[in-house]
Image (cartoon, rainbow, N blue to C red):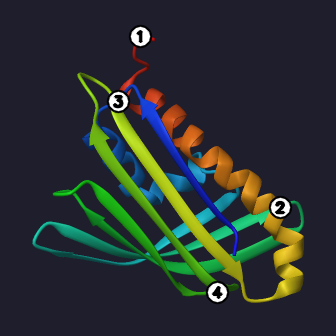
Amino acid sequence: MPSFRTTRKVRHSAREMFDLVADTEAYPQFVPLCLDLKLRRKTEDAGVVTKVVQMTVGYKALRETFTSRVVCDPQILQILVSYVDGPFRRLENRWSFRDEGPGASIVEFEIAYEFRSPALGLLMGGVFDKAFRKFAEAFEQRADLVYGASLR
């Protein structure tokens, strides 16, 4: 099953990065392959926000829509995404954030996925793999835009 994991040190606080990743509605503006995202439901319990979102991804003529549950826990600065419905057999990802000195943090991103259809997996697998490798970079660039670029 394809998977990807990356750890990056970024020039923004863990809370800023958590807030940026939790803002799923903004994803079509900057996330690779994300063409549209609709918030279907949002609940909050003891500070933990759970969203059900429907995302449409595409590359050239290929488009797929799937639904995920996104659990954002600001107490532990973690976001868990689990698959609900669509073209996958499995899709799970996790974001973790921790401060690493003043104005810097460590962002960890993990994802594992498997397409339901082997043919779709062959068509889209390579494209998804390349896109996932750019996810962390896309969020870091978005943070620079939203919060301002820090001195390097």
Q: Please provide percent x and percent y for residue 18.
A: 33, 49
Q: Which tag, 3 or 4, sits closer to the chain's start?
A: 3
| Residue with the mark numbered 4 | 86
Q: Which tag, 2 or 1, sits closer to the chain's start?
A: 2
134 to 110, vertically: above or below? above
Q: Is the C-beta separation of discs 3 and 2 under 8 Å?
A: no
Q: Please provide percent x and percent y for residue 42.
A: 31, 76
Furthest-left residue in this view: 46
Q: Residues within 10 Å of mark 1 (few under 14, many from 20)?
A: few
**Residue drawn at (65%, 54%), measured in percent from left and top?**
132
Which dot, 4 or 2, sits closer to the camera? 2
Q: Label for residue 12?
A: 3
Tell me if I can see residue 126 in this picture.
yes
| Residue with the mark numbered 2 | 126
Identify the amino acid type marked 1: Leu
Identify the amino acid type marked 4: Gly
Identify the amino acid type marked 3: His
Which dot, 3 or 2, sits closer to the camera? 2
For numbered disc 3, what is the local secondary structure? Answer: loop
Q: Is the C-beta separation of discs 4 and 1 under 8 Å?
A: no
Q: Please provide percent x and percent y for residue 43.
A: 24, 78
In this image, 141 relative to 129: left or right? left
Q: Which tag, 4 or 2, sits closer to the chain's start?
A: 4
